[in-house]
Image (tube, helix red, strand yellow):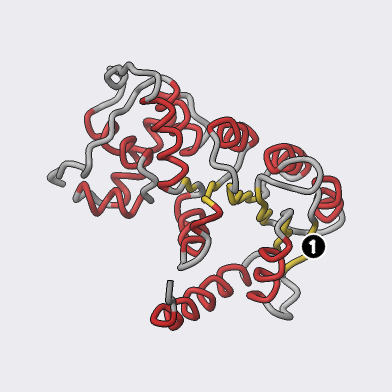
Amino acid sequence: MNLTQHLPAMREFMQSGRNLLLRRRTVIASADRVLITSLVNMVGDSGRIEGAATGEREALTCLRHGTADLLLCTDLLDSGSGPSLVAAARSIRPDLVCLMLIQRPLRSTIEAAIAAGCNGLCSRERVGNGHLLRAMQAIDSDDTYIDPVIAGVLRHSRLSRGHSQSLSSTLSLREEDVLRGICRGLTNQEIADQLHLSIDTVKHAVTALLGKLEARDRTQAVLIAFRNDLVDLPATLPRWSA
């Protein structure tokens, strides 16, 4: 595949991603040394990357002895695992933002990452062409993010069980549609645009449905929705009048 025509966009995404990472103090953990190198090169000599490691124990050492507020990791590490690292990191620093790049998009891995408290899940194959930037922007805006590939894995595993159930009667119709949007990997702004609602209305609906589902955050709401056959996803969301 010839990507030459995409080079200007790639450079723009690189600069935008660099600007976002410059707002954070980051620790990177991955068995993928090429990924570590590319992220370090993206940020440059600013010193905003406080540590990098290929194993869980070494990454935790970086977090304990630094002031990082972002953990960017993959599910695969040389020793330990991404979900185990996130769980331990959140116990050390509860306010730490954790974004995991999933290399093995298995339901068990995704569920473990959600249970560990990841703020965002992004398929490793979607890191290029601005998808990492999108994930970071979504976390800054909505606190959590799950990309469509990851949501699709969960949806496929639900459908393979061969039965479905309507949404809980405790959710309003608007909350149902917002939950469908979340399960499709949409940000609050994208849900607002598709439903023709204000962003504040969507945020209030998200808060309400999280409470009703007893979900910690959006990613856990996705897991609850698919585990319990709560949602069937239309191709597009219906239009609401404001």
- Residue at the (43%, 40%) spot, across then down: 151
Q: Between residues 70 and 85, which one lies in front from this camera angle?
A: 85
Instruction: Report helix, strand or loop for mark 1.
Output: strand
* Residue at left offset 39%, top offset 81%: 5
Taking the spot 43% from the left edge, 82% from the top edge, the residue there is 4
Q: Position of residue 68 (x, y in %)?
A: 74, 58
Between 8 and 42, the one nearer to me in the picture? 8
Q: Residue furthest front?
A: 1
Please state if 125 lies on the left or on the right of 87 as rendered: left
| Relative side of 33 to 183, left or right | right
Point out residue 41 in the picture as x, y percentages from the top left corner: 68, 76
Quarter in which the N terminus is drawn: bottom left
28 sits left or right of 158 in the view: right
Query: In the shown orientation, is residue 128 left or right of residue 187?
Result: right
Residue 215 drawn above or below residue 186: above
Q: Quarter-wise, where is residue 201 in the image? A: top left
* Residue 92 location (% of width, % of height): 78, 42
The residue tagged 1 is 51
Q: Residue furthest left?
A: 241
Dividing the picture into quarters, in which one does residue 3 lie?
A: bottom left
Picture layout, residue 51 above or below residue 242: below
Find residue 36 and report its horizontal and vertical position in percent: 71, 64
Q: Amino acid at mark 1?
A: Gly
